[in-house]
Amino acid sequence: MTQLITADLVELDQNLGNSPEDVIRHLAGRVAANGRASEVEGLFTDAFAREQKTATGVPGGIAIPHCRSAAVTEPTLAMARLSQPVNFGAKDGPADLIFFIAAPAGADQEHLKLLSKLARSLIKKDFTGALRAATSREEIVELVDNALADKPKAPASETAATAAAGGATAGAATAGAASGGAAAGGPRRLVAVTACPTGIAHTYMAADSLVAAAQEMGVDLQVETQGSSGAKPLDPAVIAAADAVIFAVDVDVRGKERFAGKPVINAPVKRGIDEPAKMVQEALDAANDPHARRVPHFGAEEQAEKEAAEKGEHIGQKLKRALLTGVSYMIPFVAGGGLLIALGFLLAGFDIALGTKANDILANNSLVNLPDGNLALYLGTVFFKIGALSMGFLVPALAGYIAYAIADRPGIAPGFVAGAVSGFMGAGFLGGIVGGLLAGYIAHLIGTWSVPRWLRGLMPVVIIPLLASIIASGAMFLFLGGPIAGITVGLNTWLSGMSGASAVVLGIILGLMMCFDLGGPVNKVAYAFAVAGLGAGSATNQAPWQIMATVMAAGMVPPLAMALATVLDKKLFSLAERENGKAAWLLGASFISEGAIPFAAADPLRVIPASMVGGAVTGALTMAFGVTSQAPHGGIFVFFAIGNVLMFIVSILAGTVVTALIVVALKRWAARKAVDTVENVPVTV
């Protein structure tokens, strides 16, 4: 491994200027002069940009300017001991010890670990004292090399701090016990996450500082460092037992949903270095405060599903998780594409989709050479083509992210390829599901192979995608694609021929599914079924558009009905529910079924059945009236893409009124009443 620091990269007792900019530029020049960077200006620009985001001065007269830069050719550490200290933003004054860390844009993990280790050493007073007492550049290099090799024996408290900050649980627990355990009535278990934009220095220094401060206060603190040299996630049991969480970060916390519901202290990562004791005390105070800010529950359900998968759920749960992941990633491709196709039809007419008309217009015309001078026709064609191309990703995206849910990133490429093969063979939505599952499980299986160390780096980027693509897509071509395509054709033919009573029955079924779990698995299956067929709709085959209209209309009913119910009889709902009802008007009008979840969570046995009845009414009416929608989302705001929009509105209103009346009736006569101690109004229990 290349030596990180040499004597030529050290400046002793020099005056390098009066500002961080002067010092960083000088050290960048020294790095480049030693052949470790391709240019001075590029390295300086990246390093100074990082400095402007967050000052790199830390307590003890130290500064650690650092960056990743494409100008750096090998990981490098330059050091300066200044005769004239410079203010790098530390609270205790200017810095005389400057360590400039320059990492390549794609630095390997081993070098990044060493650089991170050095940064952690700088909070040790014996190490910085030795640096100030050194008499030669060679002595500086030796001190740094020894610190990186762990040759000096660190004090016991520092060793425990380092172990805990790296993710070990036993060290901090022992330290907490040794200090006397929890004080009477006071919380003594905390967790923390530290992270900075480059993940080299501040991430680890903040972790060590927080752990050291916590030990002095008799607190058991476990830290997860989300840095460039890797992260070991905290044990879920440790998180569950914690009284509060500290986020000392300058970037988003990865896996934030794991801490949902915990009292939280949020601050920049540098505060974890400058004021660790204050942050620990604030976390302890927050743990005792019922009104303290808490980590939101956003994404908690997905995280719970992921953790359950890792602990070994049964095959049905695994399939459900994979399918829902695929659908959720597919929807953004479809939503924009569907709306653009609808706009294209609005401006250019339905016949723009026939034959090669769209291609011919785009090939032979432009804004300066309009087709027959018709701007609307040309723009409509552009919108239609962009939308059609976006919709073309429907099946590959579905398959790709199903595979991703099973095999993580190595499964994405095989999944997309299998989905593309499915589309090529006409196997459509069903083929995408089968291809994605097949690609994901094959990629996962290959990833479990034991291979030589030299081959491990190639596995996720070359070997797994290559072999999984060949096997999964080959199976689609040779065995599976044809039969699935036959099933898809038969299903489309059956849907296209539906009319009268059979169409109404389908509308009822779809309406029930959309309102059963309000954005959950059943709801998403119905929505995915509608979206998958949207591209097959046309002026002569409107059945897929009718299904889309039915699904969207029924999905709008629950939130609109809950909003109406809170108006019809306010006393049946708490203050929080009445406030949610105000928001539910807009959520329902936008086709966001989840707007009814707060009501369903509080009273599922009344809200869910009532919603299903209203959804079934709306589904039946939209099918009976032949309402169509060329847009996959948007609710009433995509009225221009809805055929027979008046009956679309009537169907939604009918289902909304039915659900609202049933909810009010059930809450009045099918519920025991209690008194709300806050407002002294009756509420349902």
Image: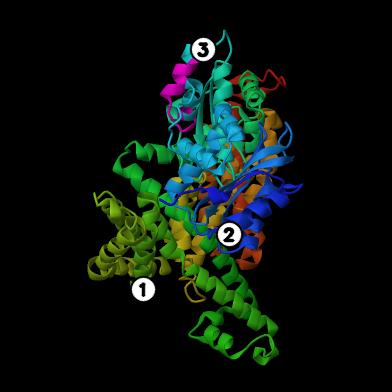
Give the structural element (helix, strand or loop) at label 1: helix
For marks 1 and 3, give the CA distance. Answer: 67 Å
Which residue type carries mark 2?
Ala
Q: Nearer the viewer, residue 519 or 89?
A: 89
Which residue type carries mark 1?
Phe
Name the residue carrying label 1: 424
Instruction: Using the image, determine if residue 556 lies above or below residue 339.
Output: above
For marks 2 and 1, give the CA distance. Answer: 53 Å
Q: Position of residue 378 (x, y in %)?
A: 64, 83
Q: Are marks 2 and 3 in contact (CB under 8 Å)?
A: no
Write the residue at 24% across / 49% down. 450
Q: Earlier in the sequence, mark 2 or mark 1?
A: 2
For marks 2 and 3, give the CA distance. Answer: 49 Å
Characterize the local packing of mark 2: few (<14), some (14-19) or many (20 or more) Cα atoms within 10 angstroms: some
Q: Nearer the viewer, residue 214 or 330?
A: 214
Q: Earlier in the sequence, mark 1 or mark 3?
A: 3
State the colouring used for the structure image. Answer: rainbow
Magenta segment boundaries in residue numbering: 163-176
Q: Specify whether residue 165 is painted magenta.
A: yes
Instruction: Using the image, determine if residue 247 lies above or below residue 498.
Output: above
Which residue type carries mark 3?
Ser
Name the residue carrying label 2: 32
- Which of the numbered marks, if any, corresponds to residue 179? 3
Magenta: main secondary structure equals helix
Q: In the drawing, does residue 85 fall left or right of residue 252?
A: right
> Does the image show residue 295?
no
